Image (spheres, grey):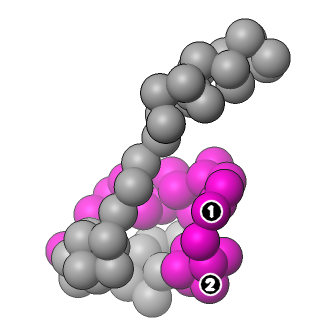
Amino acid sequence: MSNLAQKIELWTGNHAQMLSLTTQEMNRLVAAREPILTNWEHDLEVIRGSESAMAFTGADA
């Protein structure tokens, strides 16, 4: 994934951060109402996986 992040930065000039979370890890973040979820709702681009995973039921909008 770091190679993809480097390519994105070269293409766009913007820093990219890659994350890979299991369903269990994502559920823990939602249950804990982690503040980062609010940022992800606005800024995250899903490259691989389900877009529906981004429908956080516990995040503040």
Q: Residue furthest bottom?
A: 57
The one nearer the camera, 13 or 3, is: 3
Q: Amino acid at mark 2?
A: Ser
x and y percent of residue 7 in the render? 68, 20
Residue 30, visible in the rendered structure: no
Which residue bears the numbered disc 1? 48
User: Neighbour class for label 1 at 10 Å: few (<14), some, many (≥20)?
Assistant: few
The one nearer the camera, 55 or 20, is: 20
Q: Which residues, given as a range, are shown in magenta?
A: 32-55
* Residue 31 occupies quadrant: bottom left
x and y percent of residue 22 in the render? 32, 71
Side of 19 where 41 appears, left or right? right
Side of 22 where 31 appears, left or right? left
The one nearer the camera, 46 or 56, is: 46
Quarter containing the C terminus: bottom right
Q: What whole-number distance in Å separates the C-alpha atoms at marks 2 and 1? A: 12 Å
The one nearer the camera, 2 or 58, is: 2
Question: Number of callouts in the render?
Answer: 2
Q: Is residue 42 above or below residue 3?
A: below
Residue 22, visible in the rendered structure: yes
Please tell me whether residue 5 belongs to the stretch shown in magenta: no
Side of 34 where 13 appears, left or right? right
Mark 1: secondary structure: loop
Q: Is residue 10 above or below residue 8?
A: above
Mark 2: secondary structure: helix
Which residue bears the numbered disc 2? 52
* Residue at the image position 45 percent from the left and 73 percent from the top: 60
Q: Amino acid at mark 1?
A: Arg
x and y percent of residue 55 in the render? 56, 82
* Residue at the image position 79 percent from the left and 18 percent from the top: 12
Please tell me whether residue 47 belongs to the stretch shown in magenta: yes
User: Neighbour class for label 2 at 10 Å: few (<14), some, many (≥20)?
Assistant: few
